[in-house]
Image (spheres, helix red, strand yellow):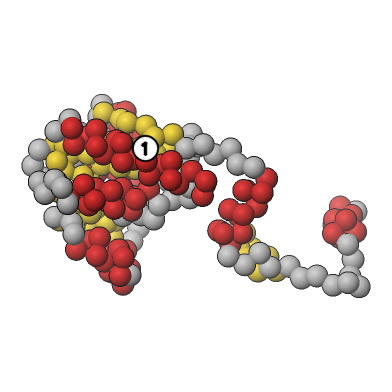
Amino acid sequence: MKGKTCCVTGHRDLPQNEINKIKTALAHEIDAAVTDGFTCFMSGFADGVDQYFVELVLERKQTTPALELIAVIPYRKRLDSLNKKTRTRELLEACADVVVIQEKYLPSVYSHRNRYMVEHSDRVIAVYDGRETGGTAKTIRFTHRMKKELRDVSVNKELSRAERIAEFVQQIKNPYHFKCGRFTVQASFSAEGATLEECIKGILR
């Protein structure tokens, strides 16, 4: 990797009403990095922020061919999965290099991927909504420990009731049959059945 390197970390589950703002802010940070002499950009290729970052870097590569994009994939089967989808396969093919952290999946593999990117970067862009747990929060803490430059893109997680409902339905796909942790929830309605209030009273007796 030549020149200064910048990587990204961020959430996969972003509020729909924030995505365009996040893309604009990411574009601004990428442009600022290019102006500051960064020529290499790394992404872990997760859904959400990572792939938005990839698309934005590749857009800029069209006018600045010296830019390089490095894909840092946590394990081999994840790479295989990305290659099965036309969109992500094309993004991978546009990368200067693809780094696979390890061959087999282990629970710690995502932490290892994030650590690799921070260790090999001079600047980290973090798209972050303030939550204290998860991979993005851990990566930010590691960035501070490594004394690397951190640039924040904040996410507004305050949604209206209607937006929260819409996002919940989008995530679970089928509101009548979905999983909550290790439990499967199946909902049905009957004109002759008990009301929700009566069911709750029955549970609380």
Between 177 and 94, the residue placed more toward the observer is: 94
Quadrant for the N terminus, please. Answer: top left
Q: Is residue 59 left or right of residue 152?
A: left
Does 17 appear above or below 101?
above
In the displayed orientation, state which residue is furthest to the front: 63
Q: Is residue 1 left or right of residue 170?
A: left
Could you say which quadrant of the image residue 4 lies in? top left
Could you say which quadrant of the image residue 122 lies in? top left
Between 50 and 144, the residue placed more toward the observer is: 50
Does 131 appear above or below 16?
above
Between 94 and 201, the residue placed more toward the observer is: 94
Instruction: Mark 1: give few (<14), some (14-19) or many (20+) Cα within 10 Å.
Output: some
Residue shown at the point (15%, 47%) measured from the top left: 63
Does 115 appear above or below 192?
above
* SS for dot 1: helix
Expressed as whole percent of the image width and height from the top left, the position of residue 193 reads 89, 70
Does 196 appear above or below 154?
below
Quadrant for the C terminus, please. Answer: bottom right
The amino acid beneath tag 1 is: Ala
Q: So how many labels did they put on this image?
A: 1
Expressed as whole percent of the image width and height from the top left, the position of residue 111 reads 34, 47
Q: Is residue 87 left or right of residue 162?
A: left
Residue shown at the point (26%, 28%) measured from the top left: 149
Residue 19 makes an appearance in the image: yes
Residue shown at the point (88%, 56%) measured from the top left: 197
| Disc 1: which residue | 25
Expressed as whole percent of the image width and height from the top left, the position of residue 62 reads 17, 51
Residue 113 makes an appearance in the image: no
Expressed as whole percent of the image width and height from the top left, the position of residue 48 reads 40, 52
Residue shown at the point (61%, 59%) measured from the top left: 169
Q: Is residue 145 left or right of residue 120?
A: right
